[in-house]
Image (tube, rainbow, N blue to C red):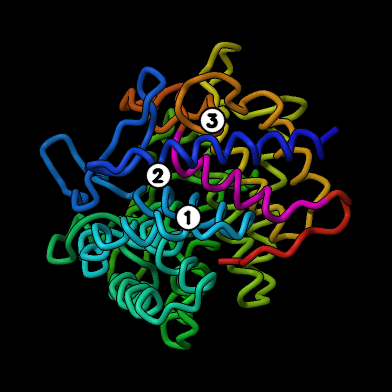
Amino acid sequence: MSGDLFVRAWHVAQVQGERLISDTGPGFPHVTEGGRWRRLMAEISGRWSEQGWSHGNWTAGFSMGFLWRLYEHTGDARWADAVASRLPELEPRAGDLNTHDIGFLFWPSFGLGAELTGDAHLRAVGLRAARTLASRLQPGGYLAAWGPLEDRRARESSTIDTMMNLPLLWWSGDAALREVARAHALTASRTYFRPDGSTYHRLRFDPDTGTVLDRGTFQGMSAGSCWSRGQAWAIAGFGRAWRETCDSALWAAANRAADYFLTRLGERAVPPWDFADTDPRAPLDSSAAVIAAHGLMDLERYGEARRLLSSALATCLNVGDDDGLLLHACYSRPHNEGVDSAVIWGDYFTLACLGRVSDSPASPRRSVMI
Ligand code: GLY
């Protein structure tokens, strides 16, 4: 049964990929509104305002990664050509000192592209972005999340999402940059977890000592709740960190995050946006499901990964005329943005998971890992 669903999902992905490449912008798909992609210009960086932090465009890399995964799956150079024509718009962000999201922007675009094509320019730009990300390391042993480092708010800031920006550093192959990733991952493994295995979304650290000043949330329901996508970033981020380092503390962190996620999910196909929202009509976040499935694959928990992916596709695969591959995701409930939408990172992780499943539930297929 799952096999048919996976074939169907690849088919829908190609239909959606055609839409992405026939619509040449301006801007890159972010989340859907009224069934159509809302586009953001690549150059919009994050910033602090009186209302707090605004992420800017942190998602442009995922539409590029979506097309790269279609290229990997089909071998059709049209997908690669389409990416190549758009990457110059993203390239200037390689020097963006405002945000940890440089990882999300560059590993699915330049990093994955370099792996798939061997292109030296893609590799060089990806490495420049990796050095920019690593420059956010604080003496306290973590990567600052939000804002230019002259601002103390930026130096103190940290989010669980950073764990899945680290693949840019793992990919770099540079020992010093990989050491930065390891330092961040170990600090996060010690500081983000509650005793039950759930994670906080946001911490504030003393930048010099790494002492936690406070714990809270930005996109979750409350400081004490568990934002389901944050938990999924933890599974995937610690899972990848373990694969890259073989450090048992990171293995334990990833599995704690996974156990909590799967226990709270129970028999449901897709998690609510926040596990504390017990309203049966609470918005779902299908992107959390596929990010978690990706992490479970890194942890070699293939049966659980496959179940999660199959359930998400069975309930959220787009079979209509809307934009997007996977419906019923939630960008941010508190900001009322992208609620019950397709989100481009959810579409990317769906394809990344599909690239790793095969007809046999026990044995994964080989797809480029990043
Ligand atoms: N900023 C990453 C996320 O919304 O998951």
Residue 139 appears in the picture as rendered: no
CA–CA distance in space, label 2 to label 1: 9 Å
Which residue is tagged 3?
A: 285
Q: Residue at x 30, y 43 (%)?
A: 24
Q: Residue at x 33, y 38 (%)?
A: 23
Identify the image quadrant of the N terminus. top right
Within 8 Å: ligand 1 and the Cβ of disc 1? no
Residue 349 colored in magenta in the image: yes
Identify the image quadrant of the C terminus. bottom right
- Viewer-side label of 3, 2: 2
Tell me: 119 left or right of 146. Answer: right
Q: Residue at x 82, y 39 (%)?
A: 3
Which residue is tagged 1?
A: 78
Tell me the crowding category of disc 2: few under 14, some 14 to 19, or many 20 or more residues within 10 angstroms, Cα based: some
Secondary-structure class at tag 1: helix
Question: Does the CB distance between marks 1 and 3 fall below 8 Å?
Answer: no
Q: Earlier in the sequence, mark 3 or mark 2?
A: 2
- Amino acid on which the number 1 mark rests in the picture: Arg
- Amino acid on which the number 2 mark rests in the picture: Ile
Secondary-structure class at tag 3: loop
Residue 102, compared with residue 119, is above or below; it is above
- Please provide the residue range marked out in magenta: 343-358
The kind of secondary structure the magenta stretch mainly shows is helix
Which residue is tagged 2?
A: 21
Residue 101 quadrant:
bottom left
| Residue 155 badge | none
Place of residue 63 in the rendered image (x, y in percent of width and height, measured from the top left): 42, 48
Place of residue 96 in the rendered image (x, y in percent of width and height, measured from the top left): 21, 64
Secondary-structure class at tag 2: helix
Tell me the crowding category of disc 1: few under 14, some 14 to 19, or many 20 or more residues within 10 angstroms, Cα based: some
Question: Does the CB distance between marks 2 and 1 fall below 8 Å?
Answer: yes
